[in-house]
Image: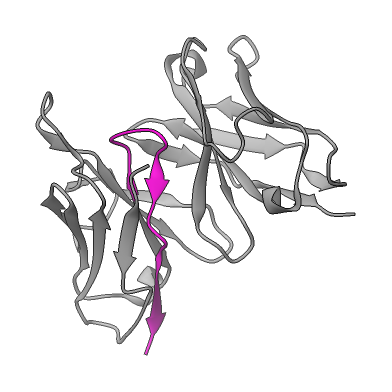
Amino acid sequence: EVQLVESGGGLVQPGRSLKLSCVASGFTFSNYGMNWIRQAPGKGLEWVAYISSGSSYIYYAETVKGRFTISRDNAKNTLYLQMTSLRSEDTALYYCARNGQPWDYWGQGVMVTVSS
Amino acid sequence: DIVMTQSPSSLAVSAGETVTINCKSSQSLFGSVRQKNYLAWYQQKPGQSPKLLIYLASTRESGVPDRFIGSGSGTDFTLTISSVQAEDLANYYCQQYYDTPWTFGGGTKLELK
């Protein structure tokens, strides 16, 4: 069974940093690109970042480019999102999702709240 | 960026009705190499993560009931749910994966009348 489990969220002050993790199981993690997608409270879905299976290709939404860094450790079956210079508008539920056809499996999400 | 416009934003239905959700993209999602439309539909129930229903505009994901039908091409797409059941009450999102940044429609909330 495919499982994606996010962690690392919490309450953080504006301007600070936070690192999210997503542990994958039930499939060959190193064969798939992965994404982070977020959803602000009561709002729609926003794609944040993508990383290819071997980390050769990385893309970001303009709203996070230069502040967020996506990475992965295929030996640990883990996807990461390093978030710096956090803003109130980054407050959201962050999901990791497998790049299947297109995003066929999603985690349960981890909440990030940016507030003083 | 490709802008995805969904309509309506909300829809109140009775069980057994057929509903149609529309999604329009600001540019064509048709890829000439594979001759496919790069459009997906997701269902999100309250408190849950999104679930993939349809990809390549009309291909149903494994395990999705056949009452969910995706259609359309180019810039205009439709999700039809025939004989709506109570378990179908949710938010529905279209998404283009033709080009980055991958973008979603604003969502359609399906409610019980």
Residue A93 image offset from top left, x and y in percent:
65, 51
Residue B17 image offset from top left, x and y in percent:
21, 82
Color scheme of the displayed model? one colour
**At x 40% / y 39%, what residue is drawn?**
B102
Q: Nearer the viewer, residue A61 or A54?
A: A61
**At x 37% / y 30%, what residue is drawn?**
A100
Please indicate, yes or no, whether residue A80 appears anywhere in the rendered image. Answer: no
Q: Quadrant of residue B36?
A: top left
**At x 45% / y 39%, what residue is drawn?**
A105
Is residue B25 shown left or right of residue A96?
Answer: left
A91 in relation to A81, above or below: below
Is residue A52 shown left or right of residue A63?
Answer: left
Is residue B100 shown left or right of residue A45?
Answer: left
Residue B24 image offset from top left, x and y in percent:
24, 58
Start-end of magenta stretch = B95-113
**At x 40% / y 80%, what residue is drawn?**
B111
Figure quadrant of the C terminus of chain A: bottom right
Q: Nearer the viewer, residue A87 or B10?
A: A87
